[in-house]
């Protein structure tokens, strides 16, 4: 795979998402709205031991990353609908640069949304205690999470038969952060749910993000998070390669 | 050394599940010529094009594109060909110029070369004024042109066009024909599929008719026309009852059994039957079809058209006397 092909494809994908006004507004406005809803609607009722805005920002970042990454599935199915993949393949551009382009574009979109959410969060009282290395580590974890979910989402796009079906994935992913410590401490949950919440991949991601941003000790949680992300990424990249060949070469 | 054929296919087979789509296709296309693959809906035209353009692997058989085997030297083959498929392969949300620059970059051009190439192609396809508009706002003809232009960023030796004029109005169709002629004038080989006989007749040096997975006829338009009886006897009958009786009883008559009505026009009560044009054959046909000399009002003898060839050759096997286009 030539890196320049992947960059050309990412450029294309970003241009297409810039012109999809509805999706663009949703991708930027929804995260901020979620933040405001959590802080002002639920924040008063939930006691987490810290200021709720500070507790919840990492969770909102994860929620937005999941939601933003899942748009990759729709973009991939849109591509499969028309004749453009045939044209790319006849130019000897394979699945890897096409999917990598979508994933890179998704990452860029997500980082913009993340910046926006952090900006608003600061404005309404988010005061993290992180040092510079803490910030960088948190960013690395978040980036790994976005990459993994975007590639997983691209894989789902190859499995789905229509953009609408791919949209169902958005729904699923946006629910995954709820049974975790994203919004409420897990010890408030019933035992069976807590067992799931404590062991699902989002929990180490959120725990390390929160720990790093709040300057608390995190132990090996970030490594656990990165391992989860690497596993999802490897699995998705392998699976998507096979799926792409199956979907396009019939 | 003579240059290799632009396309040389041998015994291509392809099935989808239990549905055999291609059952042994051989094709030979010399460089710099236009070749038309003709066939009704579902004949397997797109399947054949996708195999030749290296996008689908055949179950058996292979093909050489400019001498490169599509199975063992796919990359080299791809370097020599371009495909403009049946469904648009440009982004509606990008402008014409953006689409072409992207294709240029993917073809390995530098940013600046891609820009120049895009501008040149837009000018050549008369799209300079629309260059900065999103393709979604283009007319059908403009879309087809930008789609074709996108396939030309690399100046391929062999160009595949899958139904390039389907859905275009007569003027846009003529423009597309001019583009194809211009391409061959530069020495490019064009392989196109079409459902329009007129298009094949006007454009193609050679034509192959694809039917039920096989090439049932191959040659120049003139050769194909001589494959059928050569003439067509158009009969106009006196009443609707007579028309219905004749169209349904036609199979039973001796002289007409080997043939069939290749043309039917219920509105004008006219049906056309292939004939060699000899007085003897025409007289026998008239006598057999209308023994009491009351039902046939008038007749006209015409030279066979490519339509007749097509309908004769692509008659479904299970209903030999009922051409697919019978009720048009
Ligand atoms: N990927 C596929 N999976 C299953 N069946 C397929 C596939 N592609 C084509 N077919 C079947 O193969 C047959 C030939 O299809 P093909 O698209 O090659 O025909 P065509 O001549 O291009 O038709 P049209 O004029 O409608 O474009 C059809 O019956 C079609 O349903
Ligand atoms: Mg087709």
Image: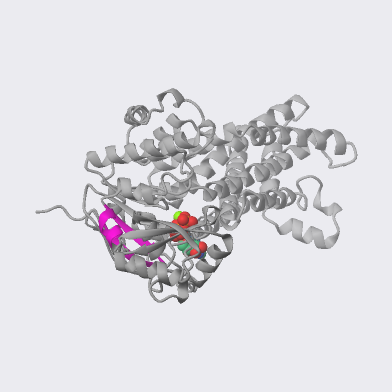
View extreme (left): residue: B1
Which of B61 and A91 lies nearest the eye of the viewer? B61
x, y percent for residue B302: 35, 54
Asked if residue B209 is among those painted magenta in the image, a careful observer would answer yes
Residue at the (69%, 27%) spot, across then down: A119
Image quadrant where one finds the N terminus of chain B: bottom left
Task: Report the magenta residues as a range.
Answer: B206-226
Q: Is residue B290 left or right of residue B2?
A: right
View extreme (right): residue: A45
Q: Is residue B277 left or right of residue B46?
A: left
Asked if residue A227 is among those painted magenta in the image, a careful observer would answer no
**Image position of A55 with respect to B291: above or below:** above
Q: Quadrant of residue B311?
A: bottom left
Q: Quadrant of residue B258?
A: bottom left
x, y percent for residue B185: 23, 39
Q: Is residue A122 left or right of residue B161?
A: right
**Res A249 visible:** no
Q: Is residue B212 left or right of residue B231?
A: right
Which of B230 and A208 lies nearest the eye of the viewer? B230
x, y percent for residue B223: 25, 58
């Amino acid at each position: 795979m030539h890196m320049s092909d992947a960059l050309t494809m990412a450029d294309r994908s970003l241009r297409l998402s810039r012109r999809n006004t509805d999706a663009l507004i949703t991708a930027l406005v929804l995260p901020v709205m979620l933040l405001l809803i959590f802080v002002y609607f639920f924040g008063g009722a939930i006691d987490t031991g810290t200021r709720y805005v500070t507790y919840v920002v990492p969770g909102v970042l994860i929620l937005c990353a999941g939601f933003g990454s899942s748009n990759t599935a729709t973009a991939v199915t849109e591509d499969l609908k028309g004749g453009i993949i045939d044209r790319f393949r006849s130019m000897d551009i394979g699945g890897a640069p096409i999917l990598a382009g979508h994933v890179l574009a998704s990452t860029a979109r997500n980082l913009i949304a993340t910046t926006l959410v952090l900006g608003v969060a600061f404005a309404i009282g988010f005061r993290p205690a992180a040092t510079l290395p803490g910030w960088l580590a948190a960013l690395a974890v978040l980036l790994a999470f976005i990459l993994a979910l975007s590639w997983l989402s691209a894989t789902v796009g190859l499995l789905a038969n229509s953009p609408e079906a791919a949209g169902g994935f958005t729904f699923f992913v946006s629910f995954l952060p709820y049974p975790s410590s994203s919004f409420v401490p897990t010890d408030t949950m019933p035992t069976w749910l807590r067992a799931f919440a404590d062991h699902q991949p989002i929990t180490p991601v959120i725990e390390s993000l929160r720990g790093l941003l709040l300057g608390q000790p995190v132990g090996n949680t970030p490594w656990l998070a990165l391992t989860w992300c690497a596993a999802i990424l490897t699995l998705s990249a392998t699976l998507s390669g096979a799926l792409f060949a199956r979907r396009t070469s019939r | 050394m003579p240059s290799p054929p632009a396309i040389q296919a041998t015994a291509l087979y392809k099935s989808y599940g239990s549905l055999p789509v291609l059952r042994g296709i051989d094709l030979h296309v010399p460089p710099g010529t236009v070749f038309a693959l003709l066939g009704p809906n579902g004949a397997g035209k797109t399947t054949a094009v996708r195999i030749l353009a290296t996008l689908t692997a055949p179950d058996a058989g292979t093909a050489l594109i400019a001498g490169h085997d599509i199975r063992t030297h796919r990359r080299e083959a791809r370097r020599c060909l371009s495909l403009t498929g049946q469904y648009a392969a440009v982004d509606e949300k990008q402008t014409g110029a953006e689409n072409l620059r992207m294709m240029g970059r993917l073809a390995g051009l530098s940013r600046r070369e891609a820009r120049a190439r895009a501008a040149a192609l837009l000018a050549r396809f008369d799209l300079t004024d629309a260059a900065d508009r999103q393709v979604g706002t283009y007319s059908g003809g403009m879309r087809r042109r930008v789609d074709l232009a996108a396939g030309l960023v690399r100046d391929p030796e062999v160009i595949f066009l899958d139904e390039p004029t389907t859905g275009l109005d007569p003027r846009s169709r003529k423009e597309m024909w001019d583009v194809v002629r211009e391409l061959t004038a530069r020495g490019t080989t064009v392989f196109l599929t079409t459902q329009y006989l007129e298009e094949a007749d006007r454009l193609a040096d050679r034509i192959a008719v694809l039917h039920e997975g096989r090439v049932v006829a191959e040659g120049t338009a003139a050769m194909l026309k001589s494959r059928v009886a050569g003439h067509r006897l158009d009969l106009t009958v006196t009443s609707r009852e007579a028309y219905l009786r004749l169209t349904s009883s036609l199979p039973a008559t001796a002289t007409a059994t080997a043939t069939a009505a290749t043309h039917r026009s219920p509105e004008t009560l006219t049906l056309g039957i292939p004939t060699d044009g000899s007085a003897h054959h025409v007289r026998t046909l008239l006598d057999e079809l209308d023994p009491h000399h009351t039902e046939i009002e008038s007749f006209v003898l015409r030279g066979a058209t490519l339509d007749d060839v097509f309908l004769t050759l692509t008659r479904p096997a299970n209903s030999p006397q009922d051409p697919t286009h019978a009720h048009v």
